[in-house]
Image (tube, rainbow, N blue to C red):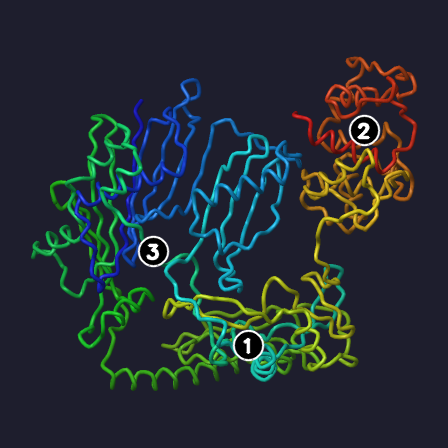
Amino acid sequence: MKRIISCFIAMAMIAALSVPAFAGQENADNLETVILKVRGKIDVPQSYDEFISNMRTDEYGVTHWSMQWSQKNEEESWNTSYISVEVTSDGFIESYNKYGGDERYSEYVKIPAVQKDKADELVKSFISKVCPEIENELEWEEPNINSGIYSYSFSRKVNGIPMPSNRASFSLNGTTGEITSYYASWNTNLDFPSPENKIPLEEAQKIFKENMPLDLEYNIDKDGRVYLQYTRSREKGSMYINAITGEVEKPEYYYGIYQNGIRYAEDAAMKSAMGAALRPEEQKQVDNIAGLITAQEAEKKLRLVKELDFDEKYKLTSSNLYQSTDLRSNETKYYINLYFTHMDNTEDLSEEKINLKIAAGEGDGYASATLNAKTGELISFSSNIWGIPRPMSKAEDTADEKQTKAKREQAKKTADAFVSKMQPEKVNKVKFMDDGSSDNFTFNYARMENGAYFIYDSINVSVNKENMKISQYNCNWTDVNEIPPTDGAIGLDKAHEILFGSEALALEYIINEKDKKAVLAYRLSDDNPWLIDAKTGMLLDWSGKQYVKEKAPEYSDIAGHFCEEAVKQLAIVGVFLKGDRFEPDIEILQKDYVILLSKLGRYYYYESDNIDDIYSRFIKEGIMDKAEKNPDGTVSREDAVKYLLRYLGFKKFAEIPGIFNCDFSDADEIAPELAGYAAIAKGLGIVKGSEGKFMPKEALTKAEAAVLIYNCLKADF
C-alpha cells in the first residue's frame, strides 16, 4: 500500500515587511543549489534513493530547507534508514541526523570501542567540514558517554565571552565512529558590542549590591531541616547590568533562533565548481516546485474575492506550502495556506511598530485561507474578530491607562481584604511582591519569617477587573515545627564578598527580544554557584549541601598497574570512586563496590553520595538480600559476580538449577546456588579466572573490581 507523503514547506513572513517574491522557479533553483552544497559536505550513499524536501522562510526572510534521503529496508518496511539535514539557503547546515536502521539502545553504561581522543578528532573534523561557520566560537567541553554514545554539547563564546543561549550538540556512535546527529542553535548576522568599552567588574559589583542585592531566605532540605541561605533577589534577580552603559535592565527574553544569515555567492560558476549533478529523485522535487504560485500571488488572488469578510486590516503573517499524495490515485497536489492577523488603527504606526505588535500577539482577529498552489483555486477560508478592545487614539489610550491604573488599585484593595479575611493569622507574615505592572490583576504575597523569605511559600489572588470578584486564590504554606532565628547570619556585605569571589557575577552576551540585538551584560551565571549558607558562608548546591563541582578523578596511584586502563575508561563513563588515590591492591569494601554498581545506568534514581538510599534500592530490587548488607565488609569473588549479574537482570536465569556447566577447576568450591552466575560470567567474558580457577571465596581487590566491571561493560549482550 502506498503511503501518503506529506512534505511541509513553511514560509513565515511578517506582513509589514516586504514579502519575498520566491517564484516557483526561484525555489527550484535554490533547492538545486542547496542540495549540491549539502552533498559537497555530507556523504549520501547512492542507495538512499528516496528524497523529500521541505522549505520554510522565517519572518526575517531567511529560507531554511529541510531535506531527507532515505532507503527502504525490503525485509522490514517499517524500518527505514535515512539522512536528514536542515540548511539555510546560503549553505549553513543547522542540523544533521543519520539513522541506519540497526541502532540498538542499552539501558546500561557501555564502554565505547572508539577511544575518546579519536572521538574528539572525528567531531572536530566533522565541524570543519560540515559547519565551519561555528568552528571558531565553540567552547570545547568534555562529552558525556551513555550506552556507548559520545554526546558533545558546546556553548558559544564571542570575543572570549560566553553566550549561553547559543549551543551546538553532536552525537557520535562509539562503535562505528559515525556522527549520528548534530544540531546548532546559533544566532548569526548579529553585531556584538565590543568588550573594550565595558565597565569594570568592580563597578558592576557595586551596581549589583546597590540595585539587585541578594535576598535572605529560609529553605528546607529533603530531610525537613530548615536552614538560611542568601540567594538572588526575588524581585530583581532576573535583571542584568548592561556592561556598556552600567544601567540595570529587565531582559526581554528570546528563545531560539530568530535569524540566520551567512551569505554565499550563488552562481553558475559555483555549481560548476562542485562538479556534481542532481540525482533523479532530487531533480523530481526541483521540477515539482517549479511553477507554483508564491504566497504574494496567492494573497492577491484571495483579495480579489470581494464577497469574503476580509479587508486590508488583515495582515499576512505566515504561509505554509505543502504537498500531498493521494492514497488511491497516487496524484500529488500542492496547496498553500495563508495566515493573517487583524490589526486595527495602524495608520499612524510605522512598519516596525506593526511588526512588533504582530510578533507580540496584539492582533484582535485572524483569518486563514487555503489555495491550490498550481491553479490558484480557493479551497477554504475563514475569518474571525475576537471580542477584545481595538487600539485607541493616543488621548483615549492615556485615559484608558489611567482608568486601568485606578482599577488595579481598587483590585489590590479587594485582594488585600480577601487575604486578611481568609488568612488572618498569616496576613502579617507576608510581603506584597509588586512587579511594577499597571495592568496585572494577579497579586502575589510572599511569606516572610524573621525578615527573610520562607522558601517559595506565598498567597496568590487574581481579581476580575470588571466586577472586582476573586477569580483565583491559592495559599501555599509549609508547616514546620521550628524556624531557626536569623541571628548569626554573616550579613549582606560578607555574602556579596563570597558571591563575587565565586565569579558568579560574570560577563555574558544575551539577546534582547525587544530589539533583536546582542547585549553585553553582567549577570549571575548558571555555571557558577550563587547560593550561600547564611551562617557558615559556604557555597551551596540546590539541595542545600556544600557545592562541589563533580568531575572524574585523576588517581595518582594506578600508573602501570594492570587495572589502569579499566579504571580510566570507567571514570570516563562516570563509574568511579571519589578521591585522589584509588588504592588498587586493597580489598574493596562492600559499600564501595555497591557505589560502583549504582553508577552503571539501569537505575537512574540513585543518589551517588547516599549509601543508605543505594542499599535500600538494591535490597528492594533483589540485587542483594537484607542479611547480606555489610557496608564495611569485603566482597568475595562469587558475591561480586552475583551482585553484578543481578544488577544486570540475570537473577531468574542464573538461579535455574541444573542447566549450567561451570568448568572452573575449583567449581566445587562455588556455592551451588551461585554456580549459574559463575558460568554466565565466564561465558560472557566477564571473568576468565587464574590458571583455570575462579577462587570464589577470595576477597576482591579494588583493581579486580574495576576490571570485572570494565569487562562487563565491554561485553556485547
Looking at the image, residue 381 sits to the left or right of residue 485; the answer is: left
Residue 201, position as x, y percentages in the image? 59, 77
Residue 532, position as x, y percentages in the image? 70, 71
Work out whether 634 lies above or below 245. Answer: above
Which sits in the foreground, 497 or 412?
Answer: 497
Of mark 3 and mark 1, the one earlier in the sequence is 1
Of mark 1 and mark 2, the one earlier in the sequence is 1
Category of crowding for the residue at label 1, using alpha-carbon neighbours closer than 10 angstroms: few (below 14), some (14–19), many (at least 20): some
Q: Which residue is mark 3?
A: 261
Q: Residue type at mark 2?
A: Val
Looking at the image, residue 667 sits to the left or right of residue 429; the answer is: right
- Kind of element beneath mark 2: helix
Q: Which numbered circle lies on residue 235? A: 1
Q: Residue type at mark 1?
A: Glu
Residue 405, position as x, y percentages in the image? 39, 84
Q: Residue type at mark 3?
A: Gly
Q: Which numbered circle lies on residue 262? A: none
Hey, which quadrant is residue 680 in on the image?
top right
Number of numbered discs visible in the structure rendering: 3
Which sits in the foreground, 684 or 673?
Answer: 684
Residue 156, position as x, y percentages in the image? 50, 57
The answer to whether residue 420 is seen in the rendering is no
Q: Which residue is mark 2?
A: 641
Taking the spot 47% from the left edge, 27% from the top edge, the residue there is: 101
Of mark 2 and mark 3, the one earlier in the sequence is 3
Whole-number angstrom distance, CA of label 1 to CA of label 2: 56 Å
Which sits in the foreground, 470 or 540?
Answer: 540
